[in-house]
Image: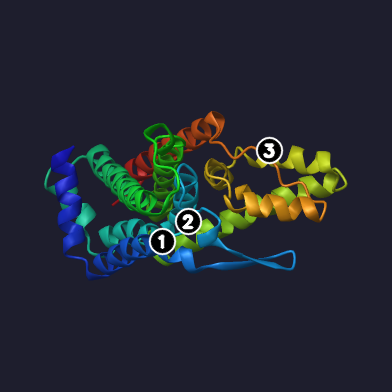
Amino acid sequence: MFRLLSIEFHKLRHSKASKVLIIIYFGLLTSIALTAAIKIPFFGKTIHLAEQGIFNFPYIWHFNTYVAALLKFFLLLVIVSMMSNEYSNKTLKQNLIDGLSKKEFILSKFYTVIAFALISTLFVFIISLLLGLFYSDYNEFTIITSDLEYLFAFFIKLVGFFSFGLFLGILVKRSAFAIGAMVVWWIGEKIIWLIGLWFFRASKEAMEAASKVTAWFPLEAMSNLIKEPFTRLSAVQTVAKQVGEDLSKDFSVQPLDIVIVLIWTAIFIYLSFVLLKKRDL
């Protein structure tokens, strides 16, 4: 494993675009602390996030992993460009000539995906822990260690997302087309959801039925791993009740969503291997 990882990181060290994107990504992760300055208009009132306990334990694990997950597209660009460079620079063929099997080649990419996801998770953990220790009103050990499943969900989400990008990068060979293909896939999932909604005449039951179906789609399953944290804030809940809105829902990480994403991850890696194995290089 370490031999394969060293090969991939050697390639990344000689890619200026990848290094820039990685620096931007981790720079943006560091800037999560700036969310303290965000103010959100809500039902005619302004909610200042810094005053709503967004850095309190254990809520900070939910909030920071959700925000950090929005930045994953920067590393996705690194993943898909990593594959397009293999074709354009002919390093894929050279690696195979030098004795690397196609299985080892795919594994080297998958190990890189896992490494990126793991480093990102550790980075978010450290930032969240420091922010929480500095700003949180609750510093008991049992409270600090509550809701750590959001970090695990974040890791699984990144692995699944990057594996999807890896598969698309191998499929279309061009990073721009791979990103475009993922956008088209996402639009397709939403269209299917809307069709299901229309078919059942846009009732509340229809929304639940459509959501249950699309929950098995890869991007939707990844999205469901970490639900939006904003309506979980007590201030938002209070304002919503005042105007007659019920925003209560289950914000926890669901085991089924994790299983679905892991299944899709396995499918994407397997299809990547099959595609590479059958393709004439």
* Total count of labels: 3
Q: Which residue is mark 2?
A: 67
Q: Which residue is mark 1?
A: 32
Q: Residue at x 50, y 30 (%)?
A: 259
Front disc: 3 or 1: 1
Q: Residue at x 69, y 36 (%)?
A: 212
Query: Which of these two is toward me, 265 or 106?
Result: 265
- The local crowd at label 2, few if under 14, some if 14 to 19, many if 20 or more residues have their Cα within 10 Å, is some
| Residue 224 visible at all | yes
Q: Position of residue 189 (x, y in %)?
A: 64, 50
Nearer-N-terminus badge (3/2): 2
**Distance Cα–Cα, label 3 vs label 1:** 33 Å
Q: Position of residue 65 (x, y in %)?
A: 45, 49
Q: Mark 3 belongs to which amino acid? A: Val
Q: Mark 1 belongs to which amino acid? A: Ile
Q: Position of residue 264 (x, y in %)?
A: 48, 37
